[in-house]
Image (cartoon, rainbow, N blue to C red):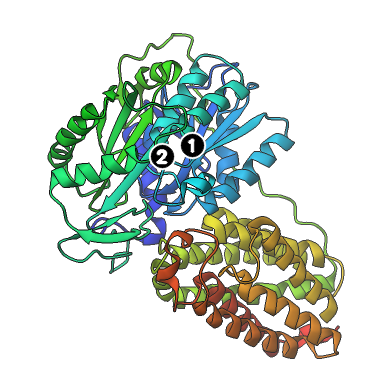
């Protein structure tokens, strides 16, 4: 558990403040994360990495000479928002472009892809390489679905070295992708980890056993086996990786970099005991080890566990792996500095200035106030149910759904309040709330809730007094945005399983002439029934997918939170006569 904290919701932000203060000669704080203290050299591709907090030294600790130019930092175990990623990338980008690289998790993919599109739309060249090293997270035939764990380091090192050579963005991306193709990892855990402020770990491992195939976000292992000796554990790790060697690699005579990673509670001496057998087994297989790394590179708070990574080298990747680097948490060789190195502007916060509130009709301003009341009610519900939503998510996921929804709802409510106070109409209130929700919540649900609120706001606009049909169309626009960005369908065990019945039920009842509040309350009941029915489904998307059997019998937390949000929204509408004036 975390012993040192203030408000759990502020943990990630406060950690960044202390980190930058401790390493101010190497890094600076920028909006959304951190960047090198020195400006990116002109003509050099900028490498931007990122992910959720809670994994130090990934990701902030890997920013510096010879490694990343910037890191977008999300909340604990939640991806950074698209705005955070965009802001970090803008702070380090040159005319040579930006390479985004990160572990392959649904929330990260959604937010990094949005940021990449925004950068490209502004004329900044951008490419992406996702890290997919964890062999236990998907079958070999579905490598693109695998998640990234400690193998991130190998890919980031290759990409950063390539950028330092001054080559083109396409060539940097090719080298990084090749590094990913030649990186494999396997992990085990002896205990779970606990989110800051939580009283229970995300998962537990029976005494005297270990979970094989755990994830760094607290995802449970694929199987649980009796705790082996150190020699037996090394054999499990090495054997698993030698059982899946990249195409074109002949093990006997190959050169490989080795990363033996501790997940937080396994200390260096224990890692060295394991490594003594790792080198023996690899030598027997004919593998030459190149500059091994034994320590902590991608952690998970206090999780007791280890992972082993093999990075199969070719001549170019070997040069990348051996190249010098100097960051707060990773140092190798001697990095040359030049007097010509420009010190970056101390004020590199790319936060967007407050936008002018669009003019709105009195009718829309009145409905904007109702909209605020709905968002406030959703925030209050999330505050009440945050622990339960986290518990549901921890059964097969990473346990952060409750706290992520809480951060998003609080930010959305604050932004909606500011918009109403400034005289905004309903559309602007929803758009401002959605943008703030997405930025502060991060993760998949944050991005999807943000997109949904903005889509609904754009449909309503700031001029009309929306009638029931307009509201139903706005809800359907929100539904379409979530399915477009999240790519989920009914039956995938996601929030869509509750959202689609809600949108369809509302549309049908309104079309039949049912008053809005009454139609909304009935549709919310449809959503609640559908959300509860997800307990019988197996997840086909997201972090719960590798642990689908564990989720059987438990409803999807995203569907539950959506249904509860629509229920409290219905109560507000039922109490407010202004919604029936149309």
The N terminus is located in which quarter?
Answer: bottom left
The C terminus is located in which quarter?
Answer: bottom right
Inspect this view and state whether residue 423 appears: no
* Residue beneath the point at 27% across and 25% down: 286
* Residue beneath the point at 85% across and 84% down: 511
Inspect this view and state whether residue 100 appears: yes
Mark 1 is surrounded, within 10 Å at the Cα level, by few (under 14), some (14 to 19) or many (20 or more) other residues, namely: many
Describe residue 373's horizontal placement relative to residue 20 as left or right: right
- Disc 2 marks which residue? 59
Whether tag 1 and tag 2 are in contact, CB under 8 A, the answer is yes
Q: Position of residue 93 (x, y in %)?
A: 59, 27
* Residue beneath the point at 62% across and 44% down: 113
Of the numbered discs 1 and 2, the one sitting upstream in the chain is: 1
Q: Is residue 159 above or below residue 51?
A: above
Q: Position of residue 131 (x, y in %)?
A: 48, 39
Q: Is residue 207 above or below residue 126?
A: below
* Residue beneath the point at 15% across and 62% down: 208
Alpha carbon of mark 1 to alpha carbon of mark 2: how far? 7 Å
For label 2, the SS is loop
- Disc 1 marks which residue? 49
């Amino acid at each position: 558990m975390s012993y040192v904290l203030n408000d759990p919701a502020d943990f990630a932000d406060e950690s960044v403040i202390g980190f930058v203060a401790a390493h101010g000669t190497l890094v600076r704080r920028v909006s959304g994360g951190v960047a090198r203290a020195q400006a990116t050299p002109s003509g050099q591709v900028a490498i931007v990495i990122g992910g959720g907090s809670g994994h130090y030294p990934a990701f902030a600790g890997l920013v510096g000479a010879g490694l990343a130019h910037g890191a977008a930092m999300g909340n604990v175990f939640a991806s950074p928002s698209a705005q955070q990623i965009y802001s970090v990338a803008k702070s380090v980008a040159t005319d040579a472009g930006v390479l985004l690289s990160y572990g392959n998790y649904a929330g990260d993919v959604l937010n990094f892809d949005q940021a990449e599109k925004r950068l490209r739309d502004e004329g900044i060249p951008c490419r992406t390489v996702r890290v997919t090293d964890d062999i236990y997270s998907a079958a070999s035939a579905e490598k693109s679905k695998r998640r990234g764990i400690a193998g991130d380091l190998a890919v980031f090192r290759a990409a950063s070295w390539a950028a330092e050579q001054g080559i083109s963005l396409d060539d940097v991306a090719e080298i990084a992708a090749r590094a990913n193709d030649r990186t494999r990892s396997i992990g085990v855990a002896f205990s779970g980890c606990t989110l800051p402020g939580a009283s229970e770990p995300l998962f537990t491992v029976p005494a005297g056993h270990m979970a094989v195939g755990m994830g760094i976000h607290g995802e449970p292992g694929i199987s649980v086996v009796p705790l082996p000796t150190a020699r037996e554990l090394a054999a499990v790790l090495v054997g698993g990786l030698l059982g899946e060697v990249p195409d074109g690699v002949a093990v006997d005579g190959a050169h490989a970099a080795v990363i033996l990673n501790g997940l937080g509670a396994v200390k260096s001496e224990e890692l060295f005991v394991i490594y003594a057998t790792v080198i023996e087994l690899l030598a027997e297989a004919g593998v030459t080890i190149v500059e091994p790394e034994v320590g902590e590179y991608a952690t998970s708070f206090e999780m007791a566990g280890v992972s082993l990574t093999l990075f199969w080298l070719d001549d170019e990747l070997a040069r990348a792996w051996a190249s010098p680097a100097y960051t707060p948490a990773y140092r190798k060789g001697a990095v040359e500095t030049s007097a010509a190195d420009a010190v970056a502007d101390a004020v590199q916060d790319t936060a967007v200035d407050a936008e002018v509130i669009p003019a709105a009709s009195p009718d829309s301003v009145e409905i904007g106030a109702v909209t605020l009341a709905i968002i406030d009610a959703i925030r209050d519900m999330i505050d009440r149910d945050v622990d339960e939503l986290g518990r549901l998510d921890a059964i097969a996921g990473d346990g952060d759904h409750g706290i992520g929804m809480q951060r998003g709802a609080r930010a959305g409510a604050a932004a909606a309040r500011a918009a109403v106070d400034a005289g905004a109409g309903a559309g602007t209130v929803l758009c401002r709330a959605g943008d703030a929700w997405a930025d502060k919540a991060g993760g998949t649900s944050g991005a999807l809730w943000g997109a949904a609120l903005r889509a609904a706001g754009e449909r309503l606009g700031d001029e009309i007094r929306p009638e029931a049909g307009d509201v139903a169309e706005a809800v359907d626009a929100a539904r379409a945005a979530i399915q477009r960005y999240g790519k989920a369908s009914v039956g995938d065990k996601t929030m869509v399983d509750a959202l689609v019945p809600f949108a369809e039920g509302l549309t049908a009842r309104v079309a039949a002439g049912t008053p809005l509040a009454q139609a909304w309350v009935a549709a919310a009941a449809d959503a609640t029934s559908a959300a509860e029915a997800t307990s019988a489904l197996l997840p086909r998307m997201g972090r719960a997918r590798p642990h689908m059997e564990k989720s059987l019998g438990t409803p999807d937390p995203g569907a539950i939170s959506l249904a509860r949000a629509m229920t409290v929204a219905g109560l507000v509408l039922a109490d407010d006569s202004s919604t029936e004036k149309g």
